Image: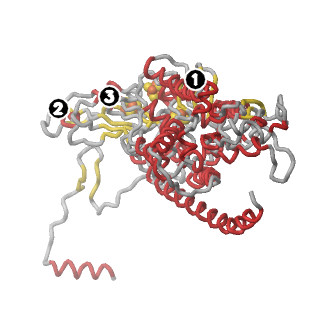
Amino acid sequence: MSAVIEKLGHDAIAAKGRLGAHKWLILRRMSQLAILALFMAGPVGGVWILKGNLSSSLFADTVPMTDPLAFMQLIAAGHLGVASTAVTGAALILAFYLLVGGRVYCAWVCPVNIVTDTAHWLRRRLAIKGSARIAREARYWMLGLVLILALATGTLAYELVNPVSMLHRGLIFGMGFGWAIIAGVFLFDLFIMKHGWCGHLCPMGAFYGLVGAASLVRVRADNRAACDDCMECYEVCPEPQVIPPALKGERRGGGEASAAILSGACTNCARCVDICPHDVFNFGLRFPAAPAGRRQPQLIGTARHGA
Amino acid sequence: MPTGKHAKGKTVSRRRVLSDAAKTACGVALFGLAVGLYARPSRSLPADAVRPPGALPEKDFLGACVRCGLCVRDCPYDILKLAELGEGVATGTPYFTARSGPCEMCTDIPCVPACPTGALDHTLTDITKARMGLAVLIDQESCIAFQGLRCEVCFNVCPVRGKAIKLEYRPNKRSGKHAVFPPVVYSDDCTGCGLCEKACILEEAAIKVMPIRLAKGELGRHYRLGWEQKQKAGDALVTPDPEHKYNLPEGLRYDHSGRGLIADEPAAPRTGSALDTLRKGIREAR
Ligand code: SF4
Ligand code: SF4
Ligand code: SF4
């Protein structure tokens, strides 16, 4: 394993160059920071392009955007007469993520992702082994809990502790002791559990995961014939369980699996695209099931093993 | 994967799956309990925090506000603030502090339409109808107007001056010859903007905006005020309207214009001993 970690990414850099092997990572960080910058440009520089925060915002003073999970909490809390702005806003955001991939929110927008990615990077650097065992399904329980809490208390109770809105709102409007919660998430991911928060617990990730299960843009393993089983994509993927069907092409019950990663848990982060020296992965749509531009399927298993 | 190992793994994993699921459920439930308990005290707004105009009643507001801060952004006076963790106001919800930055009562109320969810009620279009709280002249001992000095600053800054705050007129008992003009707040017209609290010249304001639940009493629902009923009915409710009578001892009258109790004629001089009077009383009773 440590051999894999030590040489992690070397092949990709050799094949595509340092920039090429980090293309999507760089784009992702740019996206995350640009969104934050747009929100902060108002209060800091007086340039009002995006107003509000990720829970609800206004783009260019006209387009409303509302987090659908926040919206669902409003309904669960009994605020049935939600003003039309938030209804439109939630519908727009839902439609957007149905298009680009549900957990694009996690990988391209959410500010906590930078925190947990940093924790993960440090974890690898410090070679911290061992990880608590929490089922990945825990996040769906958490999602249920968020709505039950709203229903039971009649308030948006989870928003009192939600690290995602806490961090984003905090950066823009002032954090108070919110840092403690963010530090908690960071330390949890660093010392207690690998991919602990985003991969197992975060109810927002769970919600966008459900959206992603039906969304149009997906990462695909169209060039899966070229895979040489180096396993590096599994190593860098925050949700490695989503890869095998698309990569190996086998469905559990037999038959050929779609080349698209259909699991909603995939964050469309494209770390697999970056790390693969043979460009097995690419962005595409959830259709067609068969690998597009399939290259000599008989190469499966023989490709570059000796190289 | 070899099938043998696979099959064996499966039997172990079924138990494990069940216990994992139980653990997960318990863990999540515990977390939920903690959040639920934490959410309880944060439901009541601290007395010195005031919600923006149009805010739904506190309990509903906490279920209607998504904590986006759009109201904060559209307030031209920048008085609104989203609560930070540890401040006592439910984290992320908007409020202002009257003493440091009161609501200036914009006639177009920009904060209200900015709210995407309706946590600030969009039907509020007349700022004088806002009821953010209620000003209370909470300390008459330190308010200098009550000491007979001509301050009246709170009265003069009030945007609903003369209705929400009026100056009363009273004789100054201390000097015996001057007047006292104490400011008195009327809840029918006070919007709770807090301009008066901000303007109060004391070190610590004597007039403060309080949440209405703290500032107001409430008459029992069954209670009827006779004179209001009479006015509503346009006439006496009991006919014939009995003329008010005092139950005064014989030979005594009451004068409203200041003379008070008046005895018609000097009381008859007492005769005999107390014992005689008692006997007379007993005889009369028979
Ligand atoms: S009415 Fe005006 S001053 Fe008062 S909170 Fe709203 S925007 Fe601010
Ligand atoms: S605009 Fe409405 S939803 Fe947003 S913070 Fe203000 S009151 Fe809450
Ligand atoms: S809070 Fe004070 S200034 Fe504002 S309306 Fe009431 S009495 Fe007037």
Element at label 1 = helix
Per the model, the C-alpha gap separating discs 2 and 3 is 20 Å
Residue placed under numbered mark 3 in the picture: B155
Residue placed under numbered mark 2 in the picture: B178
Q: Position of residue B240 (x, y in %)?
A: 52, 53
* Residue A19's disc number: 1
Mark 3 belongs to which amino acid? Phe
Dot 2 falls on which chain?
A: B
Element at label 3 = helix
For residue B164, say whether it is visible.
no
Which is closer to the viewer, label 1 or label 3?
A: 1
In which quarter of the view is residue B151 placed?
Answer: top left
Per the model, the C-alpha gap separating discs 2 and 1 is 86 Å
Residue at 66%, 31% in the rendered image: A277
Per the model, the C-alpha gap separating discs 1 and 3 is 68 Å
Mark 2 vs mark 3: which is more N-terminal?
Answer: 3
Q: Label 3 neighbourhood size at 10 Å, few (<14), some (14-19), many (20+)?
A: many
Q: Label 2 neighbourhood size at 10 Å, few (<14), some (14-19), many (20+)?
A: few
